[in-house]
Every structure is written in structure tokens, then in C-alpha cells.
Amino acid sequence: MTLAKRQGGGLGAALGFILAVMVLIPLAVGPDQNLLGKLAPGLMWLALLLSVLLTADRIFQQDFEDGSLDVMAMGPLPFEFVTLAKACAHWLTVSLPLAVITPPLGMLMSIDAARLPMLMFSMIAGSFSLSFLAAIGGAVTAGLRRGGLLVSLLILPLYVPVLIFGVAATAGDMGPSGSVPALGVLMALGLMSLVISPWASAAILKAYLR
Amino acid sequence: MQQFANPAKFLKLANAILPYLWAATIILFAIGLYGALVITPPDYQQGEAVRIMYVHVPAAWLGLFVYCLMGFFSAVAFVYRHPLADAAAKTAAPLGAVFCFLALVTGSFWGKPMWGTWWAWGDARLTSMFILLLFYLGYMAIWTSIDEPTRAATIARIVALVGVVNVFVVKFSVNWWNTLHQPASVIRMGGSAIDKSMLWALLVMAVAYTLLFTALHLVSLRSEIAARKLRQQRIAEIGRR
Amino acid sequence: MSKRLRLKADNVSCERGGRMVIENLSFEIENGCLVALRGPNGAGKSTLLRLLAGLNVPSGGKLTLEGGAPDASIPEQCHYVGHSDALKPALTVRENLDFWTDFLGEEKSNSALEGFGLRDLADDQVMFLSAGQKRRLALSRLIPIARPIWLLDEPTVGLDSKSLDRLSSHMHVHLATGGIVIAATHADLGIAVSQTITLGVA
């Protein structure tokens, strides 16, 4: 399954997107180092979110078009496992690398170096649910030719909690009790999406096969 | 072919109820509005601006209520495969979105004199209401972008169910986010704090809104059924050629 | 595979796009049968195959299989080769086959490559293959994994005469060992058809 995904990912484009955003943000906000440092965690989370979103509509599209999903649906594995594997593959090939690569880019935004490990840690924790929720959106648009906008509309509201707690964990010291509870919630969100997403995307894809 | 049998019965029922429903809606709105605008006293703190509440609060309630209803219909459709349930969820969505939008607009009209700004991100309810509106839009987008009706129905069902779960998660996280950013600076208006002289008008308005929704929902459900029949006929015609 | 198999459809109906494509269809197929599905375009041939493969859900009626593996569903005992070939263009021929044999729960083997004469192409990427070669690769899936029922949707499209012969001989072996083949096709399959189901006759 991971093998099948290997060539399909849009990591390159997503990475390029993040870089472009990183360049654009200072241009939009102005080169004020203090302001940038303050905004950086939130903006970087936003960049991560959007770039994962960018790849979401491709998760199932190819398999749907070439008929692989037909055969997978008939196989001995429950279809939920197929979607689970797909989402995991997406996480491993897109979200996780992005979550690892993005924080060092924070240096460009004059982010406080002491915060970087926390940023990376929270992004890795959050990227899990990002991929799994993206799979739901990917399933909805598997059979549509231009699903990009629909994916954004559907998935962005689902990303709200991840964004809130992700930034909270990153910004840590702002909160009353540090970033540990936020990290916990972030992981809980990941678990929740782990439960819901394979089921939901399998059911949606089945509707397309029908 | 239960697909035809059930809607037929429903249509009969809907046609019988609707005139009374409209009458009740109009009467209750008249009472409620009169009560809200004339009888009830102005708030000692908020002055006349409090009257927006009678429009705003029921709209917000319905925005939430309709979403839950949509989730309920979707669950029913999911379990029992009842053809009417999908149509009910589908037609509820635009109405819910309108109530949601109304709540947001009136909320910001209210916010202007009260908070001095049209929009306060600090208010958890405002923010989650906005996300709720996005949900409605996403749900409606599914129906419009998937041509095949049975397929769209199945997918919309699942999205609605996922959405219901998410509404609670969003609510929770926005509340949490809110307390993080501005602890307790928001004006509270809990139910118990409302004086009886105002409460009755608010409740009448809420019932009126609910009736209005029911009436509109029945009407649009009726036209949805008609549209389906038309589609079926057209397809049958093509098949015959 | 010498058990008696009997695939039964009892008043099966299927709806697509709000239209009844198949209405109250009943048939019985026993093992060793080659069944040809015939009928004009849009008569429901593909729909019926997908129905048997569990990809469509019947809106009425029942499909049953007697004498198959008791704890496996009908789709799990079927091979389905549809219009699209279910191949990954970026992987090689061998990788594609290995992936499917692996996924469908069998050991890798070279027999699949031999089956349709793809040995020479084993390490080429699928994106360089012609349509007919891809078709052969898709059909190769049938060989290494033993499934009693083959569901083939227009299997002959794009095949040259040599590959057609190969397909017939594979089907022949499959039928002789007690399998069932259900094929939607307009062309001649090279062996005697034992049963014909004609769809879409109003």
C-alpha cells in the first residue's frame, strides 16, 4: 500500500508552497523582526495546514480512476483498512516530512530558537490528524474532476481544532498551564480522527464505486 | 417501490398541515414581535439595543438546532435508508445556513453598540457560529457538485455525521481558545439572568422561528420531491427512446 | 476445486442514477460454466458484473453462492477485471503484479508473468506499455490467485490474436477445474459458451 503511494505524493509541490508562503509573509507583514517572531508560530501552522490541504484531493483520485479501488474493495481486507493504510501513507509521505521540515524554516521568520523543538513536536503530533482528516476530503473528491475548492470548504472547519491546539502548544508560555495539555489534546484529536476517518472515507468511496 | 409510496403520503400530510402552520407562524410572529418591540421594557444596561436579542437569539438557536436535525436525518437515512430522510437533511441545510447567517448579522448589529465593534473574535459563540456556517456551506456544496443523486445522498450523509461530531469538538476548542486569549471579558447573557418580562417574548419568538422553519422546510421538501419525480420521469423517457 | 458451485440470482434489481438498470433478474450458474452477458450499450452488463463483485448494491433481490468457501463473501471469491486495468503507471510490470498478489493474499510467483507472455516486459514501467499489453497485465492477475469465479468486463478489448488464444486456454483450464467465468462481451471468446444471459430486452 505504501508502495502504491510512493510515486503519487505531491510533497514537492507542497514544500514549494510552504516556501513561497514563508517568503510572502514577511513581504505582507513587513520586516519588523519582533512582530514576525510573534506571528510566526501561527502563520507557520497555517502554511502547514494549507499545504496538506493542497495534496488532499489526490489521496484517492488516482486509485479511483485506474480502477484499483474496485479491486481493493473486493479483497479480503475490510475496506476501512485500505483507507487507513492510504491515510497512513499520506501521513508518512506528505504531512510528516512537512512537519519536520517546516519548523527549521521558522528561522527565516526570526522565530525564537528555543521554541523550535516544541513547534516541531506539536506539528508532528498534529500532522497525524491533518492527514487523516484530509483523507475524508480526498474521498469526497475522488470522483470529481476539480475538487480542490470543495476539499478546502469541507476540511478547513475540521482543521480548526487542530489549528487552535497546535498553535497553543507552540505558543506554550502564553497559556496558563504551558503547552503540555495542548499537546495532549492534539494527540487526542489525532486518535479521534484515526477512529472516524477510515470509516468515513471508506463509506464515501463505496458510494463512488457504486 | 416505497420511494413513491412514502412521499405521496407525506405530501398529503404536508398539504393538510401547511395552511395552519403558516397561520400559526404569522400569529406567533405578530405576538412575538409586538412583545419584543413594544411591550417588553428596555434593558437597564443595554437600552433599546436589547431588542435585537429577540431576533438574534432564536436565529442562533435554530442555526444549531437545524444542524442537529440534519445530523439526525442523516443518521436515520444511514440506518433505515429512508429516501425521505436524505431529502429532509438536504433541504434543511440552506434554511439552517440562513438562520446561521441571520444570527451572525444580527449578532454583529448587536455587537456594535454593545462591544463597540462589529465583530469580536473573542466571543466564542460568534466564532463557532461562523464555523457552523462554513459547515452548512460545505454540506450544500456536496449536493451541488455531485451529479448522481443517490451517490450525493450517501456522501452528504457521512459528511453531515462527521460534521456533527466536529461541531462539538470545535465548540469545545473554541471555548478553550477563547479563555486562553481573553479571560472573562465577554458580556454574559445566560438564560437565568433574563428577566421574566423579557423571557416570554423571547420564547414566543423562538417558537415562531421554529414554526417558520418547519413551514419552510415542508415547502422546500415538497418541491424537492417534485423535482425528483420530474427527474425520474425524464430519465424514464430517455430510457424509452 | 471440484466442489459443486452454484451462483444464484433471485429477482435481483439494481438502480443507477435514479434509473432501474436491472429489474427482477433471476439466473442460476453452475461450475464449469462460461456465461456470456449480452445486450446493447447501457443494458446493464457492467452493472451486473459489479453487482456480483459487490461493488454495486442490489436494490432488491438476493445473490447467493452455494458450495463456496463458507466464511468468505461472494466478492472475496471473485476476480474482477473491469474497463480500467487497476495498474500503477510508475511501477514496473512485476511490481504491479506482486502488489496485487500480495494484496489479494497469495505468494508471489512467476507463473503470472508467463501467463500472458509478459516475461520480457517484467522490469519495464507500466507507463511505457501499450493498451493491449496493459490489458494482458490486468488479466495476468487471474492466474496466480485462485478464485472460483471470474468476472470479466469486455476482456478481449485491445488483445491481439495470440493473447486471445492465451485467454481462451486460461479460461478453458479454469472451467475444467470447476470454475465459473462470467464475461460481458460482444466478441467471440474462443470456447463454447454454455449459457447466455441477455440483458436490456424490454
Image: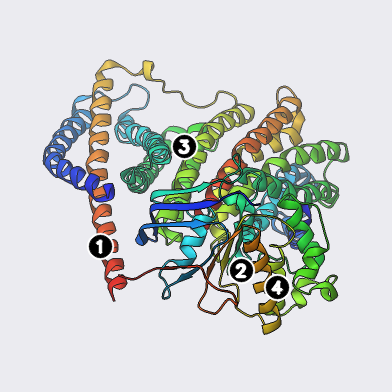
In depth, the one of A159 and C34 nearer the eye is C34
Are the residues at dot 2 and dot 4 in contact (C-beta closer than 8 Å)? no
Disc 3 and disc 4: Cα gap in Å? 72 Å
Disc 1 and disc 3: Cα gap in Å? 52 Å
Q: Amino acid at mark 2?
A: Ser
Residue at 33% in and 21% down: B44
Disc 2 and disc 4: Cα gap in Å? 12 Å
Label for residue C84? 2
Are the residues at dot 1 and dot 4 in contact (C-beta closer than 8 Å)? no
Q: On screen, B41 above or below A128? A: above
Q: How many marks?
A: 4
Label for residue C136? 4
Q: On screen, B240 above or below B53? A: below
- Label 2 vs 4, first from the N-terminus: 2
- Dot in front, 1 or 3: 1
Chain for numbered disc 3: B
Q: On screen, B3 above or below A172? A: below
Q: Residues within 10 Å of mark 1 (few under 14, many from 20)?
A: few
